[in-house]
Amino acid sequence: MSVVTQPSTRPAGGFRVTRSRRNVVWTGAAALIVVVVLALFPYIVYSGTTAILVQAFIVLTMASMWNLLAGYAGLVSVGQQAFVGLGAYFVLILAINGTSPFAGLPVAAIGCGVVALPLWWLVSRLRSGYFAIATWVLAATIMLIIERFSSIGGGTGMPLPGFTGMDPTLLVAYTYWAALAVTVLTLVVIYLLLRSRLGLVLTAIRDDEVAARSSGARVGLARMLVFLVAAAGCGAAGGVLAISQLQVQPSAVFTVQWTAEMAFATVIGGLGTIEGPIIGTAVYMVLQQTLQSYNAWYLIILGLVAMGVALFARRGLWGLVDSRLNLRLFPVGYWLRLNGDHLDGLAPPGRAGKSSRLASRASRQPAGPDAPVAARDNKT
Amino acid sequence: MAWVNAIIQGVLTGGLYALFACGLSLMFGVMKVVNLAHGDLAVVAGYIAIGVITVTHVPVLWSVVIVVPVMAVLGYVLQRTLIQASLDRGVLITLLVTFGLSVVIENGLLQFFTANSRGIGAGLPLVSESFSLGSQIQIAYLLVVIFAVAVVVLLGLQYFLSRSKYGRLIRASADDSEAVQLSGADYRHVFGICAALAFGTVALAGVAYGMYSQLSPTTGTDTILLFAFAAVVIGGLGSLWGTLLGGIVLGVAQQIGAQINISYEVLAGYFVFLAVLVLRPQGLTSRRAQS
Amino acid sequence: MSTPGNGERPDSGPPLLEIRDLVVNHGQLRALDAVSFQVFPGEVYAIIGANGAGKSTLLRTIAGLHRPTAGSVRFDGQDVTTLRPERRARQGIVMVPEGRRLFGSLTVEENLKVGTTYAREGPWTIERVYEMFGWMRERRDQRTAQLSGGEQQSVAIGRALVTNPRVLLLDELSLGLAPVVVQRIYGMLPQILATGLTVLLVEQDVSQALRVATHIHCLLEGRTTLESKPADVTADQVEAAYFGLADAAAAGQPAEGSESLWPG
């Protein structure tokens, strides 16, 4: 059976391109309900649970950022902890000077985005392996510099001011809502980003960087923007971290463990998909909660599972689900709706190695079996 | 005079850093692998040495005779299995897997050996004593020995790569691993040999550092990996002797920083690294511009 | 649409290399579609065809660098279809790859020495290669990246020869080389064949192929369009097979008085 490279029949009624399938209305509504329910948690559950959820939100935010970096822009950063730490310190510095730590969160995000600009200039020309270690060195350098300033705690850190006199339950609730808000905002930003033209460029880079470059896409600009956004996101997460821990210690906020957690969560959940980090974070939290009393074990197991997934199930848990159900919670691609006759023999796109083609491709990285191209939707 | 002392210290420490770095340079130069677990493997070697000494009570230097071959074999096996599998799946996966390996090793060590740091051969005269040149210069015997070992290792590697059959195959595989197959060589086996060499040097580095300073589960990444990488970048990729030059520059920079303020030591090294990255990314010895 | 008949060699004994129904896919693209042929000892078997016809893919599959989707490669009676490339090389299937692919950081002599690492027994040694290419001995300590295209091609051939292959696969020797240089290199073929080798070559320059080959096999979009001895086909037939014109199937003896490409 030979492979056909062009359609053998033409569609009788033409076709149209849409942004998503019909299920988006339902998933959108479901997402809204989920967010509302989560927002009500402080009224419903104990503070122990909300504390755990705050941790989950922090990891989810960071994982989504790491996913953007590695899964879409092809940048493996082992130094994101630099921005986590910087975000925490932005909040700390503002709190020392009288601002509410919560108000410091947007400043942390923007501040980290700004700091990321010269850092990008330092590392942007480096190839992957070098890029990775260079980001690590940058993070180590930033930590060493911050430790020099005793006014913000020096090497030992200091407690976070700005909450004296606040009712503890209220503090817990506000912290929770801040974490939730940051996470929801992060996911919304990522969703909009990937739906935009920039997102199309990123998806092209994800699939085949050489092809993306040669088709004229502004690859360098796209990667820089991703780096800046990821810095901002990790900065916001760092700010939430500071608030949730009520103190800022350099060794706690600048540890490479943050990168390990966000990287492993993303890989296990599914690199290069928006849903992946969500699932990965869930797995991470489950592991952490069950193995909590065993100290370093959860990181060992998390690491081993991540390595296994990277080698044997590259598209992660979400990839396994998705390839069976062809489900997408966050529709960012394009669907080709065909009117009239069945279109025979329309060739699916090539495997990873072909750049996105606007009218005929859903946003999927075909690292595994060939993705279906079009929803041959005769119901229209 | 304190400055002269500092510079001499820095130069000699460069030998230690060259030991850290040559394995990393070898693996990246030949197989294009950035092994993020590089430093942690040195720590593992150090812990194995400590274990061997504790159990068998052999003299410290004899532990080297055991640890180096063990690590070399481990390197071959790891390369043929984990790393080759990662390489076949691309750069991203390789970085992820070696990073995962690093985290697993560190937390494994933490879990089984606690966070306490340990040294090797603490009581030995070799480790604790130094000699004087004039009235103000003190040089530790250990540093001189480590520097000498580094030079010998680099000479040995250079000789092996340029004269021996496998050295030739390694260089050929680095140039074109597909074409080397057409000449009858299994490049995976050749890569394995290269990894064995790299891990052997890493073992020496770990034991050396355990004697010079102390080993803890996080030393691998805090110190060894980042310093090794800095030495490679400063010296220039693709040059074995460049790792010595890079190590020396790094060591001297650190000592100068320490002279200004003791807590600037590590920072000074990183600044030099960043400066090289910006001004001359191909390193000091490389003739080509980095592509 | 292969041209039957002219590929048969009834009294030559068993074939050295036998390709049966080879199908090779590059992702979604079918690069080779059920290609079959046999190469007998001592022949110079040339694969010709336009760019993208699948010639290099064919050679690379025989060398072991590609896995076929279907079909088989048999060498000296043994099925080697799933054998790794280095094992095939050690058994005597050695390819001189397209673009030379020398080890640029190694010297001329070191490149040849790599070839001798897993060499079989036979007449070819580094010394003999130096004798065949007179200029090489003096330049043997020069890094191959500094050589000219033709010199690199010679070293690449030498590197393959010192393994003492039984079948030498030559992939696009003429690529990027001046015609004079190409002629000189192909002029070495008789010396090579004299030591008992068999040659399977891929060549984009049709007239060059026709000059040296004992058999030609034309591919078009992965399929065989012509298989014959050069003496038995006309220029028109080759052209038709090359470009895929309608009467490529017209086999048989050339008409009286028409151009015969291979005298006698």
Image (tube, coloured by chain):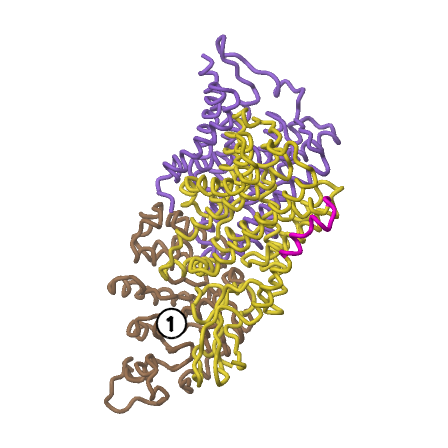
The chain whose colour is purple is: B
Left or right of A209 in this view: B49: right
Q: Residue A42 magenta-drawn?
A: yes
> With respect to residue A305, does A148 lie above or below?
above
> With respect to residue A323, does A71 lie above or below?
above
Please, what is the three-letter code of the amino acid marked with disc 1?
Answer: Gly
In the rendered picture of this protein, how many numbered marks are placed on residues? 1
Chain for mark 1?
A: C
Q: Residue A41 magenta-drawn?
A: yes
Decide which of A10, B69 is in the foreground and name it: A10
Q: Is the magenta stretch mostly helix, strand or loop?
A: helix
**Image point (73%, 37%), residue name:** B112
Q: What element carries label 1?
A: loop
The chain whose colour is brown is: C
Decide which of C188, A106 is in the foreground and name it: A106
* Region in magenta: A35-48
**Image point (70%, 41%), residue name:** A169
Q: Which residue carries the number 1 mark?
A: C52
Residue B68 location in percent, x, y? 62, 37
Residue A286 location in percent, x, y? 71, 51
Give the position of the N terminus of chain C as an image quadrant. bottom left
**Image point (35%, 40%), residue name:** B287
Decide which of C117, A350 is in the foreground and name it: A350
Extreme residue in the top direction: B135
Quarter-of-image position of residue C7: bottom left
Q: Is residue C40 in view?
A: no
Quarter-of-image position of residue A85: top right
Q: Chain A is drawn in which colour?
A: yellow
